[in-house]
Image (tube, rainbow, N blue to C red):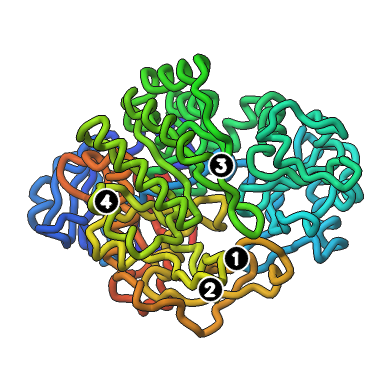
Amino acid sequence: MKLTWSLMVCALLCSPAWVDSAHAGETLLVHGHVYTGNARTPWATALSVKGTRIEAVGSDAAILKLRGSHAQLIDLHGQTVIPGIVDSHVHLLYGAYALHGLNLSTPQSSITPDKPELLAARLRDYAAAHPKDIVIFGRADFSAVPPTSPTSALLDSAVPDRPVMIHNTSEHALWLNSAAMRLAGITDQPVTDLDEERGVVRDASGHPSGVLLEAAMQLAARVVAQRVPREEKLTMVQGATRYLNSMGITSVVNATGDLAELELYGTLRDRGTLTVRTRTSFGAVAVPHHLTPEFLADLDQARSRFHDEWVAANLVKFFADGGSGLIPPLVYTPREYEALVMELDSRGYQLMTHALRNDSVHMILDTYERLERAHGPRDRRLRIEHADLVDAGDIPRFAKLAVIADMQPTFCCGAVGLNYDMANQLPSDRWQSLQQSGAVLAFSSDWPCTWPPDPFVSIQQSVTRQAWQSADTANVTGLPLDGAAQGGAITTGALYVPEERISVMDAVRAFTQGSAYAAFSDKDVGTLEPGKLADLAVLSQDIFSAAPETISKTHVVTTMVGGKIVYTATH
């Protein structure tokens, strides 16, 4: 550990009141290699923090002149500092459940239903170690394509007496044991909501198999919301935010959520224990929106109650398509989608839309273009999430229509990228093409769809585009799973469409400035400049000069949010 103040930081973190007391006065960070993100002066060696914001950035000599009698001096010993990572697309509550639960898909290996004895043993051991958990959460790679999807029988053999809910790593499918199906009210009788029933996988006799796809996952989500105690959720979310801090992540956009989830973040903020800034969208995975009076009232209440630096709303998430099956299923007709988008834009909400298919991207761009013509110009910051596959003719439309491309470099790259249609050899992950066309790139992890949500793995993938392959998931049917360091994947030595690589600085900008812009928070975060919030990460190596293939080995030494140390490495 190069930082000389590690013992003091440890004392702060161990104190119950550390959030309120840490760095109450002036703090100077000197002798560093500081990437500011400011195009005019991108590099500095020191900065001064006063309260929650950056007071000055410059040379050691200039910053040391600002030192007051009670200032805290932090010697960086040449370490690299970057603006805090703004992860532009996560599912924080799902990530909190996964972090607490049993994770069967890690960079080291993936335990799938192809290894039933091992999977059951791991689940049995986990359940025994967590006897008080009302619902047992898990995360795994499994086929979401009937009839190759698993059944409840395997989970029942391990845990017959408590609900088990295993999230597919895509977060577009759930695998339940019989106790969880009983809890969710899933029987041989069709469920009332047709969108939900469509996703209940049943056998030829109508018996539910235990797998729920897309909108059907809400059957389980509702009972989790009711049954898991609020204080347990708060504890899990708080643990998740500290975990994100350990990756240098200081802000997130939640790509699913509702008023109840926002209230969790609001409670942690009020208690002084929220360490990640949040902006939360309204939406659930592949669930079509219905603008009921209740939904609109919740949206309006969220906007009026949550609009500060820590907890913000005013954002609606759409799913143009899903993420299960051999081909992502469509969620709306173009006419249905346009009617909803038009109405919510007229009410002033920011809009983001998930799209895995190139035809979905085209439909969204067409709709956004008509929206702009119909309602006139304003600062909308319309977003398309993922945009893995984009037709060549649609690439320049992102910049022309000022649509932000929010993308996940860790999803790249299997042998065929993310292309599900072998008849159409369309390259995926067109970072360089989109950037060269003038589009704003925002980068994210989609955590817990990727594990861990390590931005440095993503940055390495952005500049190398190494191809990855996992023997563990080779028999899982569905969309390509071989992302960077995911589910036991290893590099193959090949490169996937290397002409779409971008530079380290471009990738860092997408994870900071681009993502801050996409969240309407660029006036406060995304760069290290006077007047902005003091959100930053100190790194174990200089990612700007490191060999590209070693960037993923970077660790965060220290994370600061609003002038307070929220994470420090212990070794």
Decide which of tag 4 and tag 2 comes sooner along the chain. Answer: 2
Q: Mark 4 and 1 residues: CB-CB less than 8 Å, in contact?
A: no
Decide which of tag 1 and tag 2 comes sooner along the chain. Answer: 2
Q: Amino acid at mark 4?
A: Gln
**Mark 1, residue position:** 480
**Mark 3, residue position:** 331
Residue 541 falls in image quadrant: bottom left
Cα distance in 3D space between marks 1 and 3: 21 Å
Where does residue 66 sit, x and y in percent of width and height? 10, 45
Q: Is residue 125 left or right of residue 560?
A: right
Cα distance in 3D space between marks 3 and 2: 25 Å
Residue 20 falls in image quadrant: top left
Decide which of tag 3 and tag 2 comes sooner along the chain. Answer: 3
Cα distance in 3D space between marks 4 and 1: 30 Å
**Mark 4, residue position:** 513
In the image, is residue 42 above or below residue 244? below
259 or 297, nearer to the observer: 297
Decide which of tag 1 and tag 3 comes sooner along the chain. Answer: 3
Q: Mark 1 and 2 residues: CB-CB less than 8 Å, in contact?
A: yes
In the image, is residue 150 above or below residue 535? below
Where does residue 248 sit, x and y in percent of width and height? 40, 53
Callout in the foreground (4, 3): 3
Disc sitting over residue 416 in the figure:
2
Q: Is residue 406 left or right of residue 190?
A: left
Decide which of tag 4 and tag 3 comes sooner along the chain. Answer: 3
Q: Mark 1 and 3 residues: CB-CB less than 8 Å, in contact?
A: no
Q: Mark 4 and 2 residues: CB-CB less than 8 Å, in contact?
A: no
Cα distance in 3D space between marks 4 and 3: 31 Å
Decide which of tag 4 and tag 1 comes sooner along the chain. Answer: 1
Where does residue 39 sit, x and y in percent of width and height? 14, 58
Q: Amino acid at mark 1?
A: Pro
429 or 62, nearer to the observer: 429
